Amino acid sequence: MRLSDAERQDALDVLEEHVRTGRLDIDEYGARSAKVTAAKRVSELIPLFDDLPSPRPSALLNGVSAPGVPVASSEDNALVRFLTAGAVPIAIVLALAVLILSRGRLLIISVALPLVVAMIAGARRRRS
């Protein structure tokens, strides 16, 4: 996930707090703040805060964001994961029902439905 300017600023503020509490010295703060400023993705912040306790930047917290940065709730994510995980088996059952009820006349739909659903579910998993 790409970082916003607000998330970068929040990460810099958190680093400043760690300097104020004595967990980071000025040299370490300078090196880490340069990396935060250059960071483009949330994953680039993880190694910069791994060895530090709370507070943590909002971009690294699940379900919390910097001001003005929307984040999907964990309930939405759980529902999407459930539907994505169950989509292919449901499509297979529906395809078998179509095959049986049509007595083989709609074979193409019975084969295509699970394949299309599997491709869509796979694409969604890769984006997550």
Image: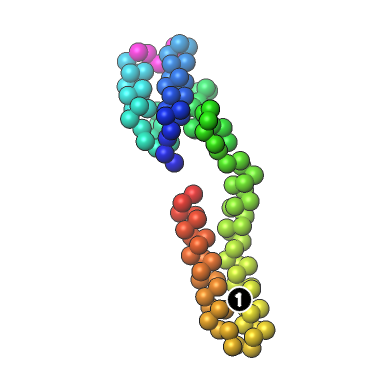
Image-quadrant location for residue 114: bottom right
User: Residue 71 location in percent, x, y?
Assistant: 55, 38
User: Residue 14 location in percent, x, y?
Assistant: 47, 21
* Left or right position of 55 against 74: left
* Left or right position of 8 against 94: left
Q: What's the coloring here?
A: rainbow
Q: Residues within 10 Å of mark 1 (few under 14, many from 20)?
A: many
User: Would you place residue 90 above or below residue 33 in this image?
Assistant: below
Residue occupying the point 32% across, 24% down: 34
Camera-side residue: 67 or 122? 67
Camera-side residue: 6 or 94? 6
Residue occupying the point 46% across, 28% down: 6
Q: Secondary structure at mark 1?
A: helix
For disc 1, the marked residue is 95
User: Would you place residue 20 above or below residue 8 in this image?
Assistant: above
User: Residue 79 location in percent, x, y?
Assistant: 63, 51
Residue occupying the point 64% across, 88% down: 103
The number of callouts visible is 1
User: Residue 104 location in percent, x, y?
Assistant: 60, 88
* Left or right position of 35 against 104: left
Residue 73 located within the stretch drawn in magenta: no
The kind of secondary structure the magenta stretch mainly shows is loop
Work out which quarter of the rendered image holds the N terminus and state it.
top left
Q: Which residues are magenta?
A: 22-26
| Residue 124 seen by the camera | yes
Residue occupying the point 47% across, 12% down: 21
| Residue 51 seen by the camera | no
At label 1, the amino acid type is: Ala
